[in-house]
Image (spheres, coloured by chain):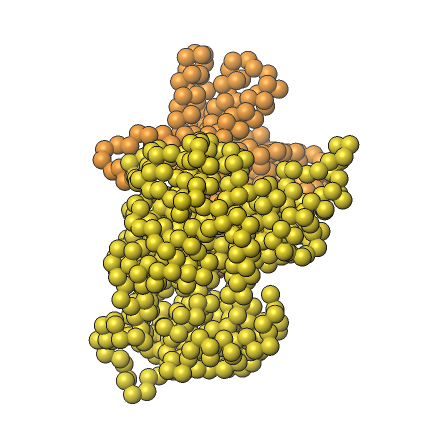
Chain colours: A yellow, B orange
Amino acid sequence: MSQQPLVTLQNVGKTFGPVTVIKDVTVSVYAGKVQVLLGENGAGKSTLIKMMAGVYQPDAGRIVVDGKTVTLPTTRAAEELGIATIHQELNLVPTLSIAENVMLGRMPTRHGMVDRSALRNRARAALSLIGLDIDVDTLVGELGIARQQLVEIAKALSINARILILDEPTAALTRHETESLFAVMADLRSRGVGMLFISHHLDEIAEVGDTVTVLRDGEFIAEVPASTPEDELVKLMVGRSIEDQYPRNTGGAPQPAAPQPAETQSAEILSVEHLSSSGRFTDISFTVRAGEVLGIAGLVGAGRTELIRAIAGADHYDSGTVTVRGRALPRGNIQAAIKAGIGHVPEDRKGQGLVTSASVNDNLGYATLASTARLGLVDFAGQRSRAQAVATKLRIRMHTIDQPVGALSGGNQQKAVFGRWIIAASTVLLLDEPTRGVDVGAKVEIYELMNAITAAGGAIVMVSSELPEILGMSDRILVMRDGRLAGELTAAEATQDAVMTLAARDVDEKN
Amino acid sequence: MSTTTQPATRRGFDYKKFLANNGALVGLVVLCIALFIATPDFLTGQNLLNIGIQVSTVAVLAFGMTFVIVAGGIDLSVGAVAALSAMVSSWLFVGAGLPGWLALAGGLVAGLLAGVVNGLANAYGKLPSFIATLAMLSVARGLTLVISDGRPIKTPAEVSFLGGNLGPVPMPIVVLLVAALVASFLLNRTVIGRSMYAVGGNAEAARLSGLPVKRILVTVFALAGLFAALAGLLLAGRLDSAQPQAAAGYELDAIAAVVIGGASLSGGLGKISGTFVGALVLVVIRNGLNLLNVTSFWQQVVIGLVIALAVGVDVLRRKTRSS
């Protein structure tokens, strides 16, 4: 690459107090290229892009734009040099229209009033840059996350961004939406926009990237072509090889040494019969046995999360029964479900799983707060020792157990949600996207945890949009489509194609 | 999220951390020293007892408010409920001829019921607490006027006792200390208290963990009503009569005390000790300004600035801590 980079972070470093977060890292973005930034959570990716975006200033090294050393004291300064960031949490105002969002802060005016028609025209021009044909008067809050992202990209381009930083843009997208985002990225690339792309999905790297910069513990590890095989990338990223990403069905992991209870035909723990909830799902029946992981696959909007929530008692349903160990559960009653042994790991960790302002200790104890109390008084000492034990067992990495859980990395936060149900001795775990936003190392730990739970006679129902995870971890797979069961596959017969055929039949244009 | 790791400094007394976590207390101490230097009247036994009596009403109201704010809500009705409770108590005594102790209990029950209604409207009626309690503010104040026909009513001796002395110690101070201990115990030690933090921090996560969020919210507002009733009785006891316009605007003092004490209006944070200090800050400032002959008009300006300053410092502190 003899061409001059649009922007280079050269030998940059950053410390917060005594903690070095970034040490001597160099990364460049070239016109018409997609540079991928790869690393586990905590590797320093966020800090690095914040330096490029003008949020943080490097303590060492320099930033070079178009061959000139610059300082980026504010995000505004970065934007003026054409550097725009598409954050994971989008910066849009949901109650304003698309046009107003695109032109926010730059409203065209006439006689001091907003010039509505100029506003619409300019917004339309911006959207056409990425081929988005949509009514600009639509409120942004009415759009799906994928469309919102495109609006944000259009906004960035309309202020002449030449360098786009995309921070995990695909984390919340379906496969279909991801593909249309990639199409937009390919188009931008052909028009000379340079991009810095972050993703936890390794399979996306070869598809969209040109070069990969790998970071580990704040240090530059390697720069490799995006065509590098996935296991090679994983090895660079975690610093050891993870022989087995899915330690269940493949032979690499230690064989289940724990004695499987009733090896011949284990007991049915959870049974769901003719469960229906209007507008969500219809006539769902299945059973799960002790020691089994049942995967539920399907497209976003197929009713998987709704089904899980109904079983957990989080939502009401219209008809049907949920039975745990022969006892029917009352509808919409979370406490009864927990008592029967159900533990629910919801899809949105921060919004539904954790009280991020509260400590790890508190978060681990909520499900057992009342059941371990005496005369209404909290069992502090007992809770502490239970929490300590489970934190050690699950290897939750933290400074102290009194640290706010929100300060932990995604994987450790997710372990804290799991830990709550382990303390509650739950035997039926309902997992909704259990590894979303979790880095590779912690993913494997969560899978191993799932194996330990089933080896001890528990049962797991897992909803996941990551097909490799469904295929790799499930003993049996249910596929949902439009709120109904579209089919059931055994681990042996399940392939990506088989699952997708069931999941997507005549609904491929829903989003 | 991926990069913030906090240094673990554990050796010795971390005075920086202490200052950061106890800003209101430090402010109070500085304030007291300044007043001690500025006027000889500040550090006298009589003045300190005065402060104690004055803080009792605000602090007891604010303890109730702490539950609500920790649980992520707000209660605008506590001042009006305080007045209503005192009026109900006096009316039960004078109008219905009940024995004094029963009238006192009736006043507490009235406050509790008003709180339960707030809680039901919020938890089950899905009204935002701001609206539900704003409505209750108006209803309670209106009922107070209806019952009293706009005139003060004499309190029973049992209520007046709450405003009197126990030996050398004014009863309001005794009640205040007991209320502080009870409130602190409830918030720190009991299941319902710890649940309030969870509900205020993230109601949905609390619900999915099996906490009975609606019942908790009703309890929270019921407690706020009960503490408001107690504050109302303290106030009436001091005046030997329930006044129809008593405690008007006190809800704002209570909210200010809780916020100065370090609670977050978005819920999940707050302590009774902090609220106590917050109430003391408010009352000591008023007291000091009185001693220095500053008019009540200017006092309002100063109090406003202090609230802005306290919360501003707190916001700054959180910002530096989280980055």
Q: Residue at x 49, y 75 (%)?
A: A500
Does residue A254 show up? yes
Q: Out of A259 and B32, give the one closest to the viewer.
A: A259
Image vertical order of residue A289 relative to residue B43, above or below: below
Q: Name the residue located 63 percent from the left edge and 56 percent from the top edge.
A: A131
Residue A167 visible in the shown view: no
**Which picture quadrant has residue B28?**
top left
Name the foreground residue: B182 vs A160: A160
Count of numbered marks: 0
Q: Give the camera-side residue of B99 and A432.
A: A432
Residue A355 x/y as whole percent: 43, 52
Residue B38 percent across, percent down from the top left: 45, 12
Taking the image as shown, residue A488 lies to the left or right of residue A473, namely right
- Residue A106, horizontal then vertical, whole percent: 65, 37
Q: In the displayed structure, would residue A186 be above or below residue B130?
A: below
Q: Quadrant of residue A316?
A: bottom right
On screen, residue A262 versus residue B213, left or right, reads left
Q: Residue furthest front?
A: A2
Residue at position x 64%, y 41% in the image: A104
Toward the bottom, the furthest residue is A264
Left or right side of B283 for A358: left
Which residue corresponds to the image point at 44% horizontal and 75% vertical from the top-left?
Answer: A496
Name the image quarter holding the C terminus of chain B: top left
